[in-house]
């Protein structure tokens, strides 16, 4: 098929590169000439493992191109995917980029004499595709429903493994306005061997929110349990969660071997969830519920627990050190998780102002974050990927992402550089690492006397 993809962020560019690798002719569209130029050179505007290889292969084969001219990209195409951002505007998604893209697509369809399907991949609340997108296409194209196709095709990509997730999906959800629209999406994904679910537009929109809300709930449950363990001397959340994981309903035994589903990685304690999707999507679903008169107390609690978690982790460090005023703290990681350069809603950035408010000087290390990106964050010093410089004369370190740079470090050597070798493991990523006796190691979710009073109530 010949398809156009509007938006070259994580979703749009990964989708384009992967579909080109499956033989489709893909024309990526973006409003930024700089971004388009970068893509044409085979470079991705963000870090994502495996993406640049696919970009180069698609460009070399002539199956992938990038342009700022949406109308030209749609010429002769059979399907357009809208993959623009819907960033948070308070608790509601900002639809301005989606609306602008839809109007331009409709205008291009006005000059077309062939049936064309418009599919929304952007994350939008239920009803958006059927109302906003449909009405804007009609108004700008002059076409009536049925003269163009309309679908909602949510993505389930994880930053850091987005290429793998796209090429080997566990399901493809096709929300269709009618069977003819859905058939075009079926053809697009013909080479993918997985479950393909044809559902209504609103069901597809809601499925995306349901997926991210479940993952968020699992993380918040784990972190609330961690806070309870921290308030209970002798308790350790890893022990409790490991026992929980062995429930046969969570990890069944098949042919004598235990199956460990990947979803159990979300049943692990940490410093909270972040990124471009989970916080935004849970809040959007809560807001949608209020507009519909539906209470969402569970989702409200998920967000409240996530908001509290950075303060609880800072309290571990404060208790371990007897105070933070005048101390130098090293944050090991700034991105919302390892393997990405995405700072959006990063828990590490939520920790930073709390440390500063306690009087600490804060420096940081992250191998994927550029100095330009770190410049406006309020750090006292940023060492990029130089762990040694980050820990030089530091009083304590807080591991905030489980990057191999930190997990595989020579901690005996690192401890020798620190003024006070206090290490708070905000991801419990070092729990199986043999650390030198010189390090005072504090995993999260472990009961300690200085945390007992008041921790569970916060």
Image: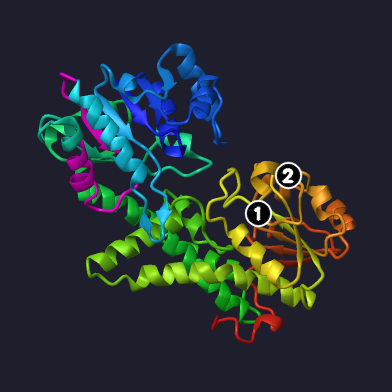
The mark tally for this picture is 2
Q: Give x and y (percent) for residue 340.
A: 58, 43
The x and y percentages for residue 257 are 47, 50
Residue 383: where, in percent of width, then height? 77, 47
Asked if the magenta segment contains residue 121, the reply would be yes
Residue located at (16% from left, 36% from top):
138
Q: Where does the C terminus fall, quadrant-wise?
A: bottom right
**Residue 251 visible in the shown view:** no
From the viewer's perspective, tell me whether residue 59 is left or right of residue 118. Answer: right
Q: Quadrant location of the N terminus? A: top left
Between the residue at mark 2 and the residue at mark 1, the CA separation in whole angstroms equals 13 Å
Looking at the picture, how far across and down is residue 175, in whole percent?
Answer: 22, 42
Please tell me which residue lies in front, 128 or 337. Answer: 128
- Magenta region: which residues? 112-137
Of badges 2 and 1, the one in the foreground is 1
Q: Which residue is mark 2?
A: 384
Q: Is residue 397 left or right of residue 84?
A: right
Decide which of 247, 37 is in the foreground and name it: 37
Query: In this orientation, does residue 333 appear?
Result: yes
Q: Height in image: 121 above or below 36?
A: below
- Provide the residue designation for mark 1: 377
Label disc, if present, on residue 198 of the rendered structure: none
Identify the residue at image location x=74%, y=47%: 408
Secondary structure type for disc 1: loop
């Amino acid at each position: 098929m010949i398809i156009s993809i509007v938006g070259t962020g994580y979703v749009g560019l990964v989708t384009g590169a992967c579909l080109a690798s499956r033989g489709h002719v893909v024309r990526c569209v973006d409003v930024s000439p700089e971004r388009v130029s970068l893509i044409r050179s085979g470079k991705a505007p963000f870090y994502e493992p495996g993406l640049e290889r696919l970009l180069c292969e698609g460009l070399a084969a002539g199956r992938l191109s990038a342009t700022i001219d949406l109308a030209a990209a749609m010429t002769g195409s059979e399907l357009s995917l809208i993959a623009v951002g819907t960033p948070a505007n308070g608790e509601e998604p900002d639809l301005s980029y989606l609306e602008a893209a839809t109007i331009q697509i409709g205008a291009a369809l006005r000059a077309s004499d062939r049936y064309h399907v418009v599919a929304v991949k952007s994350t939008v609340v239920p009803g958006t595709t059927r109302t906003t997108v449909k009405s804007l296409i009609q108004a700008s194209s002059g076409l009536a429903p049925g003269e163009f196709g309309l679908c909602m095709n949510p993505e389930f990509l994880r930053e850091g493994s987005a290429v793998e997730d796209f090429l080997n999906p566990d399901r493809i959800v096709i929300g269709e306005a009618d069977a003819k629209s859905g058939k075009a999406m079926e053809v697009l994904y013909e080479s993918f061997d997985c479950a393909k679910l044809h559902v209504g537009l609103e069901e597809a929109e809601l499925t995306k929110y349901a997926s991210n809300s479940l993952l968020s709930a699992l993380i918040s449950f784990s972190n609330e349990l961690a806070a309870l363990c921290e308030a209970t001397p002798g308790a350790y959340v890893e022990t409790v969660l490991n026992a929980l994981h062995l429930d046969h309903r969570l990890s069944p035994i098949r042919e004598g071997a235990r199956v460990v589903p990947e979803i159990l990685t979300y049943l692990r304690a940490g410093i909270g969830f972040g990124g471009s999707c989970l916080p935004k999507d849970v809040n959007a679903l809560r807001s949608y519920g209020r507009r519909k008169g539906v209470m969402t107390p569970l989702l409200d609690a998920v967000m409240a627990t996530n908001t509290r978690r950075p303060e609880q982790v800072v309290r571990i460090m404060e208790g371990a050190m007897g105070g933070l005023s005048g101390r130098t703290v090293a944050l090991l990681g700034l991105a919302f998780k390892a393997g990405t350069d995405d700072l959006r809603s990063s828990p590490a950035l939520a920790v930073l102002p709390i440390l500063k408010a306690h009087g600490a000087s804060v420096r940081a290390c992250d191998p994927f974050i550029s100095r330009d990106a770190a410049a406006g964050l309020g750090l006292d010093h940023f060492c990029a990927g130089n762990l040694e410089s980050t820990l030089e004369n530091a009083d304590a370190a807080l591991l905030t992402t489980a990057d191999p740079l930190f997990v595989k470090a020579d901690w005996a050597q690192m401890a020798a550089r620190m003024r006070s070798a206090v290490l708070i493991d905000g991801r419990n990523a070092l729990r199986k690492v043999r650390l030198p006796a010189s390090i005072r190691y504090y995993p999260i979710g472990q009961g300690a006397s200085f945390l007992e009073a008041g921790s569970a109530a916060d």
